[in-house]
Image (cartoon, rainbow, N blue to C red):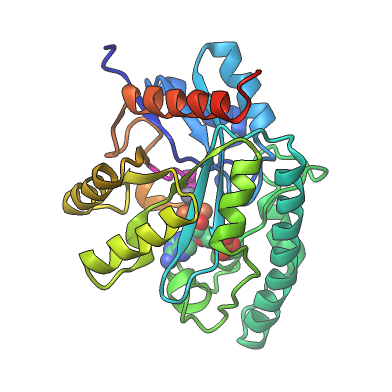
Amino acid sequence: MSGRFVDLHTHSTASDGSLTPTELVLAAQRGGLAGIALTDHDSGGGLAEAHSAAAKIGLRFVPGIEISAEAPPPATLHLLGYFIDYTSPALVDMSRILLEGRNNRNPRIIARLNELGCNITMDQVLEIAHRNGTGQDRAVVVGRPHIAQALVESHCVNSLKQAFDVYLGMGGSAYFDKERLTPRQAIDCIHRAGGLVVLAHPVQLRAENHAHLQHMIESLIDLGLDGVEVWHSDHRPQDSEFIAQIAAKHKLLVTGGSDFHGTRKPDIAIGIGRNNVRIPERILDELESAWKARKQTASPAA
Ligand code: AMP
Ligand code: FE
Ligand code: FE
Ligand code: ZN
């Protein structure tokens, strides 16, 4: 056993991270990691670039995605897809639907902000989303963190956190939800794209207690969930411990990652490979073995 570490939850400029896919891969290498998964929101748009950058330097790479699914408030339900075929029609079609949902929502948020006296424009938000070497021609998932940055740059708020607390977060005065997939649709889509489905940061389900959390996870298992993210920057040690117990009980895969977004999540911007979430490489070995076993069962002739 090499004693090396991986990070299985990261974002790039293809969604709301601040490093390009190539920069992210190089940062992971500098941080001493053995491998990463790129899990941009709603899109596999950064995967081809990250994949080839990782291959060049011999970093292990998992093509991934993070999909926001419907859940009753105050829950946030994000599903990670691992080892997805990012060229699969199932995934490309789904991304298009999710991008449309964002394109319907983002102008509403900006219009409301304008009514509230914050004069930011969609062009400003798009410029921020395409900054850092990601050309205008490339599809980028534009999200609330980009709008938050526009609010900071326009001096409407002092910090990204304040932008979410006052305006953009659930309960904020410019909060609008976006169209989402149901959990079943998201799980089926990741499976059709050949990937494994892992529940991201289960604490964000905001369960009332342990029994409630267990029940919510079991409902997802009924829909085909393959694993749970046990270690995450938002998890306290006791959260990870309980989630690991549920995983053991149901023989779920376990994963972990920092949810690195670069400067877009200042509290975990310390650097990929340098934060508190330390995932041993064997977690990636186990995930990869499970994926290979699944592929063999799905197509025994292959
Ligand atoms: P969106 O996908 O456009 O709805 O934006 C969701 C993203 O916003 C999440 O993935 C986080 O990166 C970020 N986010 C959500 N809530 C907060 C918050 N309270 N503070 C900072 N960032 C947040
Ligand atoms: Fe994000
Ligand atoms: Fe998430
Ligand atoms: Zn994430």
Rendered location of residue 226, percent (x, y): 44, 43
| Quadrant in the rendering for residue 51 | top right
Q: Any magenta on residue 259?
A: yes
Residue at image coords 43%, 45%: 259
Quarter in which the N terminus is drawn? top left
Whether residue 193 is situated above or below residue 182 in the rendered picture: above
Query: Is 249 displayed left or right of 20 in the figure?
Result: left
Q: Any magenta on residue 251?
A: no
225 or 100: nearer the eye? 225
Whether residue 113 is situated above or below residue 101 in the rendered picture: below
Residue at far bottom of view: 115
Rendered location of residue 262, percent (x, y): 48, 43
Whether residue 45 is situated above or below residue 169 in the rendered picture: above
Q: Is residue 29 visible?
A: yes
Residue at image coords 56%, 32%: 83
Magenta region: 258-264
Rendered location of residue 58, percent (x, y): 52, 12
Q: Is residue 27 visible?
A: no
Quarter in which the C terminus is drawn? top right
166 or 63: nearer the eye? 63
| Quadrant in the rendering for residue 183 | bottom right
104 or 12: nearer the eye? 104
Residue at image coords 69%, 37%: 133
Rendered location of residue 301, percent (x, y): 65, 18
Residue at far right of view: 137
Residue at image coords 56%, 78%: 175
Query: Is 16 displayed left or right of 157 in the figure?
Result: right
Residue at far front of view: 300
